[in-house]
Image (cartoon, rainbow, N blue to C red):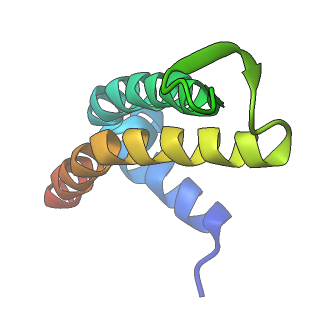
Amino acid sequence: SRSTASALLNQIRTEGARGLYRGFSVVLIGVVPGNMCYFGGYEAGKSLVNTWEQGRGRWHNSDLVLRGVKGDLITGAVAQLVGGLAFNPMDVIKERMQAQRL
């Protein structure tokens, strides 16, 4: 059975320390836009938890209806959804590109 340490040492022996970072540029290509979308989704999620003024049909920015855990869950869910929609296709491409080099 191979351990993580033996796999690490084998990688360094066969390809050198640079081999540990093979495919890193592909990771950056996916992570940077994915994180940008995630934080954009976070801001959108914060907007969603703003108060809907009853009967007036407009958003009111001064108070939050969903304070605490509920608001945080909605904000996090929107951020993860938006980030995931952007990041998942890039992650699939990254993994395929890395697997082709094996």
The image quadrant that residue 7 belongs to is bottom right
Q: Nearer the viewer, residue 10 or 52?
A: 52
Asked if residue 82 lies left or right of residue 53, the reply is left
Most extreme residue toward the front, as rendered?
55
Q: Is residue 84 above or below residue 44?
A: below
Which residue of the protein is positioned furthest toward the top in this rendering?
62
Q: Nearer the viewer, residue 96 or 17?
A: 96
Residue that lies at the very extreme toward the right in this rendered image: 68
Q: Quadrant of the C terminus?
A: bottom left
Q: Where in the figure is residue 55, as x and y percent of width and height?
A: 57, 31
**Residue drawn at the location 56% of the way across and 56% of the way down:** 8
Residue 6, horizontal then vertical, whole percent: 61, 66
Q: Is residue 5 shown left or right of residue 65?
A: left
Question: Taking 76 as reference, is 31 left or right?
Answer: left
What residue lies at 54% left-to-right and 24% top-to-bottom?
A: 56
How many discs appear?
0
**Residue 70's spot in the image, x, y percent?**
76, 48
Q: Which residue is painted at 30% across and 51% down in the image?
A: 88
Q: Quadrant of the N terminus?
A: bottom right
